Amino acid sequence: MKFLVSCGLFGCFLLGLSACSDKTETNQTSAPPAATITVYSERVEHLIKPLFDQYTAETGVPIRFITDGAGPLIARLENEGEATPADLLITVDAGNLWQAADKGLLRSIDSPILEANVPAHLQASGNEWFGLSARARTIVYSTERVKPEELSTYEALGDEKWRGRLCLRTAKKVYNQSLVATMINTLGAEQTEAIVKSWVANLATDPYSNDTVALEAVIAGQCDLAIVNTYYFGRMQKENPNIPLAVFWPNQDGRGVHVNISGAGVTKYAKHPEAAQKLLEWLSSEEAQYKFAEANEEYPVNPRVKPSPLVQAWGEFKADLVNVEAAGHLQADAVKLMDRAGYR
Ligand code: FE
């Protein structure tokens, strides 16, 4: 695993794990050099590095980071304990952040800035983590074989008329676990299980390994609709604006569209907690939010920032305002429920 380091006013710093030093040398000023912030990030390099570079350029604070899946990063934080070099953990999906907080790996932050920039339902009630971008997990359908008038709710994807026409991603993915967890939270386990069973009955084929493959299957005619995170559709649409797919916003007369986050928290054993908090606050600011979301065609969490034109073109929608923490609390229940329903 290698550390990647942000470049800015103070130049680039290439540091190995064993050579972690907070000292940077400069002969231009007598002010003490800023400590390097270390970030463990599930969000991939091309989405975060431009922001880290900008932050370093503006503040002189160097940032080094590693990227990996949430599972390995959380395991690493657990193993390193107090010795961890990590100051900030960034993951996708509230379910992952909830796990990290539940294991005591994040610290509670009292920040009026984060409270003002991040809506209450997109942050931990104990303030251990905060959303930085929002993603809607919604219905994307074939414009060649489905009319939007035929669609209404997630539940209705279990209707007879969709038999053999639905594509889903594997139940092993945390995104689907979070979707089902929030349904359990709102509808109860019994009703949710019946809905998931009805989806399974309508599957065109075994669940796919990822959302992009599910969308490609819709284009290829293997199925007519899928439940995916909007940015996967956005990436395809960016490549090909005439792609024969469209977004549908379900449950607009009810609980709204399932929204999840990518987000971050300052680690329990951060060596530079104040600096890490400042970076987190900056990432939630109007200055950083457009770029943070736009890089992946997501929605800014900061209500004062609009999404990219490509995302805006999908139209406004009513989002489910259930606190995304439910995705964590009910994750184990969701996994068991999907298994019982035959969703693999
Ligand atoms: Fe994703």
Image: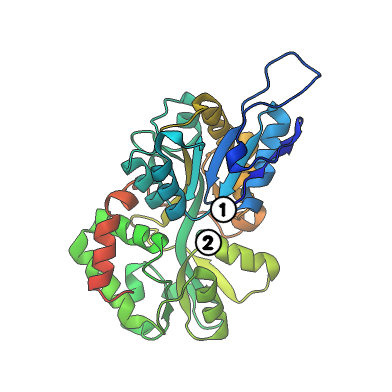
- Which of 119 and 13 lies nearest the eye of the viewer? 13
In the drawing, does residue 271 fall left or right of residue 199? right
- Which of 135 and 159 lies nearest the eye of the viewer? 135
* Dot 2 amino acid type: Thr
Indicate the quadrant where residue 283 lies. Answer: top right
| Direction right: furthest residue | 28
Figure check: 186 above or below 160 = above
How far across and down, in percent of the image, does residue 192 sit?
25, 65
How far across and down, in percent of the image, does residue 228 sit?
47, 66
Do tag 1 and tag 2 residues touch (Cβ < 8 Å)?
A: yes
- Which of 54 and 147 lies nearest the eye of the viewer? 54
Nearer the N terminus, badge 1 or badge 2? 2
Figure check: 218 above or below 123 = below
Residue 230: mark in rendering: 2
- Which of 123 and 155 lies nearest the eye of the viewer? 123
Label 2 crowd bin: few (<14), some (14–19), many (20+), radius 10 Å: many
Indicate the quadrant where residue 309 lies. Answer: bottom right
* Dot 1 amino acid type: Glu
Q: Residue at 20% of width from left, 61% of height from top?
A: 189
Residue to which mark 1 is pinned: 298
| Direction left: furthest residue | 190
State whether residue 307 appears in this view: no
